Amino acid sequence: MANFITDVAVSISQVDERNLQARRFLQIDENLNKGAGGARIFLWYKQGSSAAPITRLEVSFNKEMAEGLFDAGYVKIDKNLVSGTAGKEIYLWYFKGAGEFHTPIKELAVTTIAKKEARMFTLGWERLACDLNRDIQGSDWIHIWVKRTQQTYICDVIASDDYVYDTFYFEDGYIRIDEDTNRSTGGSNVFIWYRQTTNPDRGLTELQIAHDGDRANLQKRRYIPVDVNLNSQNKGDPVYLWHKKTKGEEPIEGMTLLVNPAARQDYERNVVIVLEKDLNEGTGGAPIYLCYKN
């Protein structure tokens, strides 16, 4: 029987580390606070086959994100991932689900160097989009990664520009890409969500980001829109996510958001599709790009 991740924890002190070692947790030897000047923070896990598997990891960086996770039954690891820094609090959550949209996680990893990311993305790892040093200038780019027991495919995408339906989306099997597409624009917090399946026949095959003026052309090409403006309530032009499923083409295996401009070329060199349109074009916000891999 295959092993999978059954428990996850975080240490922010040597006392925490000793306690987790005594409980037979395994440590990932990458400091989640690297380059930020705060406490040494590490991710820990247990792996086995006798307990229920973890199927979801999510990050929250504001109280509204946390409310939906809590109401949907996610477990909060109550250790601030930017402890000892000037950054806003960030927390890790996990969930043990079952059904078509929940595939057990078998491995965890952490990257602190952007150049390592693209290669991992092509090898079937899923990247939590939130940089754990997101509010700390000049720090390293820190991302948590998960790998599942089976290959999964993106079968649904939606977006939200408020938090009203977060609990419902989590309960319905969606994963929230934990970075705001409206980051630093002054607009609404906007998030892209997706569901996964192990059935490749259900997988979407293409994604696009486009202004509203491209609507007729994309509809003619049989793309389907996600009717939430990714530039909601900011000064930029309306921007929308579109998706398509074409029989006979390779399904999408993974998707994420890139905020680090230096990472874009590395992903493209590793044959990852990085959509050309900056989600924050014309808003004054941080450049953000959606990328995916078939």
Image (cartoon, rainbow, N blue to C red):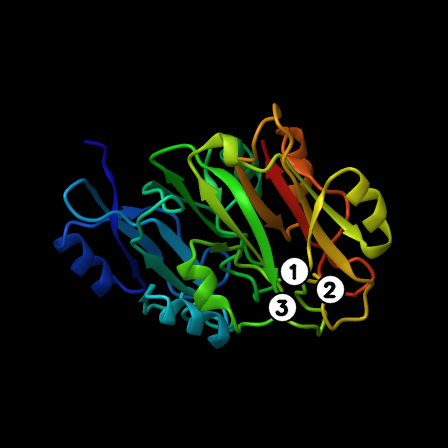
Q: Marks 1 and 3: which is nearer the front?
A: 3
Disc 3 and disc 2: Cα gap in Å? 9 Å
Residue placed farthest to the right in the image? 213
Disc 1 and disc 3: Cα gap in Å? 10 Å
Disc 2 and disc 1: Cα gap in Å? 7 Å
Say if 100 sits above or below 191 in the image.
above
Residue 290 — which label?
none
Choose the circle earlier in sequence order: 2 or 1: 1
Quadrant of res 42: bottom left
Residue 78: % across, % down: 32, 69
Q: Nearer the viewer, residue 165 or 265?
A: 165
Kind of residue at badge 2: Asn
Kind of residue at badge 3: Asp
- In terms of secondary structure, where does tag 2 sit? loop
Query: Is disc 3 surrounded by few (<14), some (14 to 19) or many (20+) residues within 10 Å?
Result: many
At 53% from the left and 73% from the top, the residue drawn is 164
- In terms of secondary structure, where does tag 3 sit? loop
Kind of residue at badge 1: Thr
Horizontal side of residue 201 vs 218, given as left or right: left
The residue tagged 2 is 231
Say if 152 sits above or below 175 in the image.
above
The residue tagged 1 is 181
Image quadrant where one finds the N terminus: top left
Image quadrant where one finds the C terminus: top right
At 28% from the left and 52% from the top, the residue drawn is 44
Query: Is disc 1 surrounded by few (<14), some (14 to 19) or many (20+) residues within 10 Å?
Result: many
Residue 276: % across, % down: 76, 43
Q: Nearer the viewer, residue 208 or 39?
A: 208
The residue tagged 3 is 161
Mark 2 in CB contact with mark 1 (< 8 angstroms):
yes
